[in-house]
Amino acid sequence: MKRYYNATTKEWYNEGQSLTKRVENGVFTGIPSVEQLTEWGFKEWFEPTPTPTELLERAKANKINEIEIYDTSDAVNSFRVNVGNEVIDTWITPEQRSDYKNSIDAAELLGMTEVHPVLNGVAITLDIQTAKMALAKI
């Protein structure tokens, strides 16, 4: 689709669209010809060729966007826990990790040997060292 721009009036026109324009003998409404557009001061708009710097900036922005999408995906934001005969896919947010660490530390200070975190609504039992190792790996 061709685009046209009138630098004097700051108007844009997209090829094939209807246009209403005040003209000498009244009002034009319809799809103008290229000749009419030229007569009214429109010139075909050509997208400027991006500079190497602009291309690099676009590529960097696209890559950062891809990384951010991947960073929030299940590909990196999930882990599996075997609970009996069941495998649970889950994730723990940074806030939950902090809460679990505090619980593990408190349980250890109180002389407890196990903790019982809840993952996806299922309570599991872990000894203190296993809980610390699991949390460190997340």
Image: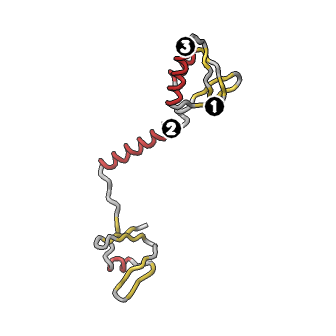
* Residue 15 at x, y percent in the picture: 43, 71
Crowdedness of circle 3 by 10 Å Cα count: few (<14), some, many (20+)? some
- From where the camera sits, is residue 129 visible? no
- The disc at residue 36 is none
Give residue 74's quadrant in the image: top right
- How far apart are labels 2 and 3 at the CA level? 32 Å
The residue sitting at 40% across, 84% down in the picture is 27
Q: Amino acid at mark 2?
A: Thr
The residue sitting at 48% across, 36% down in the picture is 71
* Residue 33 at x, y percent in the picture: 40, 78
> Is residue 77 or residue 116 the one in the foreground?
116
Q: Amino acid at mark 3?
A: Glu
The disc, 2 or 3, on the residue closer to the chain's N-terminal end is: 2
> Is residue 29 or residue 133 the one in the foreground?
133
Which of labels 3 and 1 is toward the front? 3
Q: Which residue is mark 2?
A: 72
- The disc at residue 108 is 3
Q: Amino acid at mark 1?
A: Asn
